Image (tube, rainbow, N blue to C red):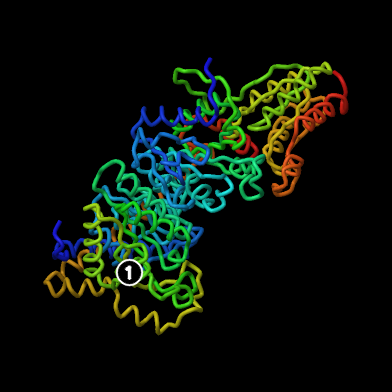
Amino acid sequence: MRELTMAQALNEALREAMREDARVFVMGEDIALHGGIFTVTKGLLDEFGPERVRNTPISESAIVGAAVGAALTGMRPVAELQYLDFAGIAMDPLVNQMAKLRFMSGGQATVPLVIRAQQGAGRGNAAQHSQSLEAWFFHVPGLVVVQPATPADAKGLLKSAITCEDPVLFIEHKMLYNSKGPVPEEPYTIPLGKANVVRPGKDATVIATAQMLGRALQAADTLAEGGLDIEVVDPRTLFPLDLDALLTSAARTHRVVVVHEAVTRGGIGAEIASRITEQIFDELDGPVARVGSLEVPVPYNPKLEQAMMPQAADIVAAVRRVCYTGAGAR
Amino acid sequence: MSDVPATLSTAQRLDAFRTMVRIRAFEEKAIELYQKRLVHGTVHATIGQEASAVGITLALRRDDYVTSTHRGHGHCIAKGARIDRMFAELLARRDGYCKGLGGSMHIADFEIGMLGANGIVGAGTTIATGAGLSIRLRGTDQVAVTFFGDGAANQGALHEACNMAAVWKLPVLFVCENNQYALSTPTRDSIGGGSIAGRAQAYGMPGLRVDGQDLDAVFTAAAGAVARARRGDGPSLLEIHTYRYQGHNTGDPMRYRTREEVETWKQRDPIALTRKILADEGSATEAARIAAAAAVEVSAAVEWALQSPELTAAEMVEYVYATPGLHPDLGRRVRVFEEGN
């Protein structure tokens, strides 16, 4: 199969969606001629023109608010927040408007829009351009939250997000845009709310998102050398969360580690650990472990930036802890 | 479209009078229902400001869009919403516009382009800008009107919306209802430069200060701005000077203004002024008939609304997402909750 970068795969998804449905348009800062700062919208201006590939002023609140207004009145906007860190400026339209309008209007409003944004550390962008904020939005009823980790998933999930009747926050990772992977030539979609067992295994389950998926797979290779057979599962969408898939895996391996780049405190790992513990406590050989970033703002210093984030070695250590301590072997 | 200022015919003025009277009757009843503890939460009355909602919407078509504010009853009724369903919403019943899930601050009727009142000051302005963008992309000649108050004039969202609508020449009408107070804060303490209409110049759009107690003045200003937007010449900003006789909401002690000030504004009541013109035009009897009919309509509407049942928790959870089955877990938890009670 051909290989694409994640940026190319996302570009292809946008191009296909815009060809398939004239209601789809893209808007955001520097997305037209410039093609977006990570080239995701490169070339769309040439094919679709400036009405449907729309550069905006630096006005995050109006970008999201206008996307909401357009979605309410028959369009399917795909709006880009250049960094998810800038969501702070758009928090009202994201949380009070797009997430709630359907409910508050008693089901009258349909808000079929996608907000694309990228997040994450590893690029030396320091504390205001590197956060992992998915838990903020995971917490809000009314939103769909997607977090792809591979080029193929990114394309298929974005296609599904654009046809979804509900507002989707589509969270990309800046360090994955240049990562390559196989992507089918023919159009396809990946349903929202379906986890992916990326690597099957029997001794422990590692649930990992975005940039952490690669590190979890590295950790699994290392652990395999020591005779531990690790299952690695990527939820792919945080809401709806494919809890059944996570429970199935956890019930088979009896040991679970959840890994994300966001700081551990209040992260989605806490929710996943609770759900697993509440529902299949008797199946577990020990507590569900969490691996997340240190609870500090993302530092500029490159060594410290990596030091705050989970590394493959941290995941290895966490898996060993859950495998060799606690309730012991079954 | 000609640029001759639009004026109201007697028939239009009678219609407008009817709408203003219905808005006031609705709100007086809503306050009464609140005082009887039948309406809970809060009610923000627009009494005294009716000529703004009615004068602006007179210049609109059914397929034009409106976004509104926490003080939105007048905009809803003027755009054509049914007052019985509005009462049902205030009374938290299933026949309410939002099935009792939204209440006074969130009434919407998408069938008539009423995209919703809004509880967040200034939020409707960017949504209307998006409706304007949608109009542009779909190639229709609709317009989008966003009502906001003097309080919202100081929100960053309004600046972003005005600028975006201006650079894209969108068919958006920004209507500031300056009722002199943002809750308790007078405009003299909050409006830098002193004029909201004056800010329009910086965006390169027309900005007009309008006497909000004068129905004809509001209509004429609105008709001009709407015609401009329909022609594709872009947005305008109207600053409608008006006054609310009630407090910010039910329960406001109103320590920030004098009784004399309220009485002075009441001398120029928009409904009384319109009624006088109608009398001068020989329609006094018709005006009296309209006023009596509004009271009857309101009473019947409340009776109808009170018959409406409430939504159940199991039904409520169906309105979070449009996609069927997106959150099945929620339904399971409701059943547990109901069994637990």
Q: Nearer the viewer, residue B11 or A147?
A: A147
Across and down, in percent, residue B181 comes to 44, 72
Task: State the SS at label 1.
Answer: strand
The quadrant where residue A19 appears:
top left
Q: Residue at x 38, y 63 (%)?
A: B29
Across and down, in percent, residue A29 comes to 46, 46
Answer with left or right where residue B213 lies relative to residue A246.
left
The quadrant where residue A239 appears:
top right
Q: Nearer the viewer, residue A55 or A195?
A: A55
Q: Nearer the viewer, residue A226 or B14?
A: A226
Q: Quadrant of the N terminus of chain B?
A: bottom left
Q: Residue at x 41, y 65 (%)?
A: B149
- Name the residue tied to disc 1: B240
Give the mark count: 1
Can residue A240 be seen in the rendering of this structure? no
Across and down, in percent, residue B333 comes to 61, 35
Across and down, in percent, residue B297 comes to 29, 57
Up-down relation of residue B163 to residue A23 (above or below): below
Answer with left or right where residue A114 lies relative to residue A120.
left
Tag 1: amino acid: Ile
Q: Quadrant of the C terminus of chain B?
A: top right
Q: Chain of mark 1?
A: B
Q: Residue at x 55, y 27 (%)?
A: A5
Q: Nearer the viewer, residue B303 or A164?
A: A164
Can residue B252 be seen in the rendering of this structure? yes
Answer with left or right where residue B127 lies relative to residue B325.
left
Q: Residue at x 48, y 42 (%)?
A: A80
